[in-house]
Amino acid sequence: MTERKGFTLIELLVVIAIIAILMAILMPTLNRAREQGRRAVCLNHLKTLTLCWSMYADENDDRIVNGEACWDPTGPPAAPVPTSGPHKGEQYWVGNDCASGFMQGEQRPLDIQKQAIRVGALFPYCKVENVYRCPTGIRGEMRTYSTGYGMNGCFDATGTYEGNKGVRVGRTVLMVKKRSEITVPSPAYRLVFLDEGRVTPDSYAIHYSTPSWWDPPFVRHGDGTNVAFADGHSDYWKYRGAETIDVGKMANPPHNYRPTTEEGLADLKKMQEAIWGRIGY
């Protein structure tokens, strides 16, 4: 009789164990590489949006686009021109792509979201819907990026506005209406776009006169997030405070969160200075 040769059960188990160990070692590395790739794409999207934001100002007598998104969760896709208030005559940068229950994960139909982006004031300068979305965005949402309040956003953050003019404190214009108003600090330090991570009906808000977040801190890539500035560059911010990271990673993070540690307060101040150009307390 001929002798048959093959792997024994012990040998097979050893091979399987070795493969499992190698996978356990390699998977975190592969995940980090995948995340770094997504982060790079997100940074490029933010840089592209900021370039288009600047092109809009070039063609509109230095006036920057209305940073608010249209808020009509049940109406057809639209980005009208307000006829009163601080944004009188300024078309919304994106249309009504946000559902009424967005904080609980409710979404408008995908085709409505796409149309809402197309009718926005910035779309003629950035005609690719995917640029408005981070690759790590929530499934079913076309837009994950928001403007910062200070860049012609919602004026109720400072409590006042002067007709259709930017709000000024000393040499710093808190609510910027024109690109030329971004002087203190320089455009390299004033935030225009950020990867908020979920579609919202407004620009990203943060308090000016109190040591407190308004909208929650957002954690999008690792323990930080991506942002873009008025000079056209984009950057990755890594948060210092464990509390900032913990709150930002919650499924439904709280609004008006007040930091309790030095590191958490440093994260808050960094964002306040980027949005407003200064701290008001």
Image (cartoon, grey):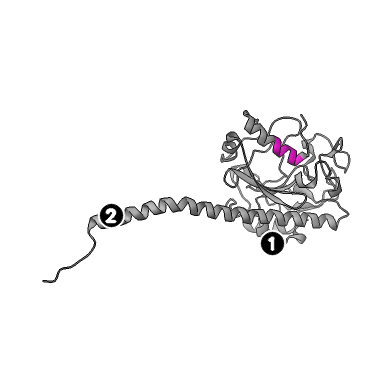
Decide if residue 101 is in sight here.
Answer: no
Disc 2 residue type (three-letter): Leu
Q: Residue furthest bottom?
A: 1
Rendering quarter of residue 281: top right
Position of 178 with respect to 48 (left or right) is right
Q: Report how far apart the C-alphas of labels 1 and 2 lie in the structure.
A: 51 Å
Mark 2 Cα shell of 10 Å, populated few (<14), some (14-19), many (≥20): few
Q: Residue at x 80, y 34 (%)?
A: 159
Q: Which residue is mark 2?
A: 13
Q: Earlier in the sequence, mark 1 or mark 2?
A: 2
Residue 170 point in image, percent of width and height: 87, 35
Estimate the x, y position of residue 96 in percent, counting from the top left: 71, 51
Considering depth in this image, is 64 or 74 the residue closer to the camera? 64
Q: Is residue 19 left or right of residue 150?
A: left
Whether residue 145 is visible: yes
Which residue position is annotated with label 1?
Answer: 128
Which numbered marker is on residue 10? Answer: none
**Per the image, is 126 magenta?**
no
Q: Quadrant of the N terminus?
A: bottom left
Which dot, 1 or 2, sits closer to the camera? 2
The relative height of residue 157 versus residue 66 in the rendered view (above or below) is above
Q: Which residues are magenta?
A: 269-275
Q: Amino acid at mark 1?
A: Val
